[in-house]
Amino acid sequence: MIPLEIEHLSVRYGDTVALDDVCLRVAAGEIVALVGPSGSGKSTLAAAAMDLLPIDAIEQGVVRIEGTDIRTLSEAKLEALRGGKVGIVFQEPATALNPALPIGRQIGEVLELHTSLGRAEIRTEVDRLLAQVGLGVSPKRYPHTLSGGQRQRVAIAMAIAAQPVLLLADEPTASLDPVAQAEIGQLLLSLVRERRMGLLLVTHDLLLARRIADRVVALDQGRLGEEAGLPRPSTPREPRRGGEALLVLDGVTRTYPDRHGRTAALTDISATLARGETLAVIGESGSGKSTLARLALGLDRPDAGRIAIGDREWKGARGGALRGMRRQVQAVFQDPAASFDPRRTVAEIVAEPLHLLERVPLAERTAKVIEALDQVGLDADAMGRLPQAFSGGQRQRIAIARALILKPDLIVFDEALSALDPMLREEVTTLLLRLQADHDLGYFFIAHDMDLVRRLADRVLVLRQGRAVACGPVASVFKRTDDPYLAALVASA
Amino acid sequence: MTRAIGPILLLLVTAVALLSILWTPWDIGTIDIAQRLQSASLAHPLGTDQLGRDLLSMVMAGAGPSLGVAVLALGIGLMIGTPLGLAAAARNGWLDEVISRAADILFAFPALVLAMLVVAVLGPGASHAALAIGLFNIPVFVRVTRAAARSIWTRDFILAARLAGKGPWLISFQHILPNVAGPLITQGTLQLSLGVLAEAALSFLGLGAQPPAASWGRMVADAQTLIGVAPRLVLLPGLAIVLTVFAINLAGEALRDRVAPETGL
């Protein structure tokens, strides 16, 4: 019995073709990775496999689960299928789990619905499942007490609880840090092999696909194409020796109050970033990367240590001096959807940093906005529109234009490319390299993607639990194998 | 079409309220016992009340105090509560504590009972009723504004505004206020319709607009013993109250869909 067979599947929404004559099989024990840019129809295909398409979708073709055409099934049988024969793992474990129930109960619920096990049997089965997904925690724990990787393990335990023949995983690692990403990839691989399930892995992470999948198929504008050409890891770029120091971090420590007094988010971090140079900061979630970014931006003050832009310190800077420093440092944030006030037009958004200058006449303002948009490859007619009208990649360009308008010396990128699919990431990376060369910009670059670090960064600072594990040129830091944490981070991509 | 019903209905009630200031079919101050409790006729389309006043004129004139008091009370709540809520959200620490606890204290009292107390102390009348109801709108708007504003403060675009050198007050008015408009409109219409009901309750108890001004609440109160004889004396002002509240709620929904469609609260 073949877990999943899709034959000549076409799906349309009105006039928009989401899928065009797609044929795909997933055999037992096989991992098929489905890759493609955003909007290529990946999610539509996954939804069609469970007959979960929105009602306005027009469908043609056949989807068979273990030989049964799912469109001949009644709604009740379909419900038994979803979560029963077909297990599902979603992108965001934080929203896929019910925050009000202990994890053991949630896994138990799946068993209650899809198996005929008794109470005591369910309890032992839950323990067995937790062990199988490598989660050595009590079933009485609540989701919010677990890390992202642990929550995704719970979600996987729920997905496999009813012994499915097919597992659908929709970007299962996209919201995780690199270490957890690698671990979840490994877990999926071993589960599929052990249980002889089929796994359809929807992802835009080509490296994950290459690592665990047996076959990689690419979707482009609804058509199934050739196996995607997989990227080779980039070679680290030649470190350039920059000139004067632009950003100086010297023994920086930041603590936050908590129940037991204070916990340190960052302890004794020192690093410098020169003009025209890129310093990458890597580390797992919660290692203090974003705290460091906020400190560098002067949005937060350290408890100890010194943070200076050029030779001026954030501490004690007020009035004109503070505005002068702010003009030198701008930022691009992770989530292009949250980076803009949804009620402001692109022109207003890009012009916002001009607030730091003395009154700028309207004509000059407009000229500056047009120039900034032009530098990131956007037309002037974008100005009157709202940010929601743009795609993810274009929004990130708008964010970069906003960061450029004051012609700063330093730009802080807080995982600014993680939300983009590989093609857009490539485009934006090229753009960033060009802008850096043109304007001699310093980049303070927080990243999850090691390949990006190799391409963009001269030097890298590795954080773990708020402490610097390593700091130095990318090539030499990535070569080190003596530290298991560092090795796991580097191997993760 | 259904979208338009609320606003049209509310415009109608408002128009009647404004018209009644200038003109009503009959003078509501004239008592004519000989004409009392007449049923509907050409001269008196809705009949007359227990004192011989034209009921249509009474219902029309009642719209003014009803809407006026509710709007005034809403204005007091919005003008004072919203800035306080914005301030509490912008400044964690003592200012937030003071504002939030003060709102909690006001909340702890049953609103209508204390409104009665306020009116009893200040003396009955429409403006005092508005003041009393408005007082209890303040903590509502403090809470709604603070909660919505706090979630906006965590967004990245606020960081971008701070990087542009904007301080907490400027950010509050340029970025936070427009983005909390949705919840404020939703709460505003709720408070407006609650205000209409509260005004009716206060006038029912004789604490609202005073005679000879008409008031729906007092019309119900005055006619309650006659409900068996002439039920329309109670039902018509009651119906006017219900219709007004209904119109406000529908209009509020339509307004929110226009101003802040993405909130969907």
Image (cartoon, coloured by chain):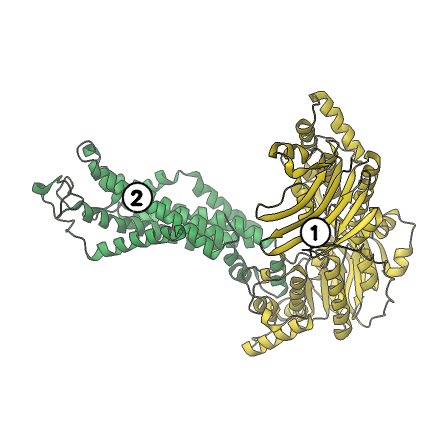
Q: Which chain is green?
A: B
Determine whether A375 is above or below A338 in the image.
Answer: below
Picture coordinates of residue B27 (x, y %)? 14, 51
In this view, the residue in front, A93 or B203, is A93
Image depth: mark 2 or mark 1 in front: 1
Residue drawn at point x = 80 percent, y = 36 percent: A134
Picture coordinates of residue A93 (x, y %)? 69, 42
Q: CA distance from mark 2 to mark 1?
A: 60 Å
Residue drawn at point x = 85 percent, y = 53 percent: A490
The residue at which mark 2 appears reads as B241
Determine whether B85 is above or below B228 in the image.
Answer: below
Determine whether A257 is above or below A405 in the image.
Answer: above
The residue at which mark 1 appears reads as A21
Count of marks placed on residues: 2
In this view, the residue in front, A64 or A78, is A64
Q: Secondary structure at mark 2?
A: helix
Q: Residues within 10 Å of mark 2 (few under 14, many from 20)?
A: many
Q: Secondary structure at mark 1?
A: strand
Q: Is residue A172 left or right of residue B192?
A: right
Residue type at tag 1: Asp
Picture coordinates of residue A221 (x, y %)? 69, 57
Q: Quadrant of residue A364?
A: bottom right
Determine whether A460 is above or below B126 in the image.
Answer: below
In this view, the residue in front, B57 or A201, is A201
Is residue A173 at all visible to an observer of this figure? Answer: no
Q: Which chain is yellow?
A: A
Is residue A352 at all visible to an observer of this figure? Answer: yes
Residue type at tag 2: Ile
Q: In which chain is the residue bearing label 2?
A: B
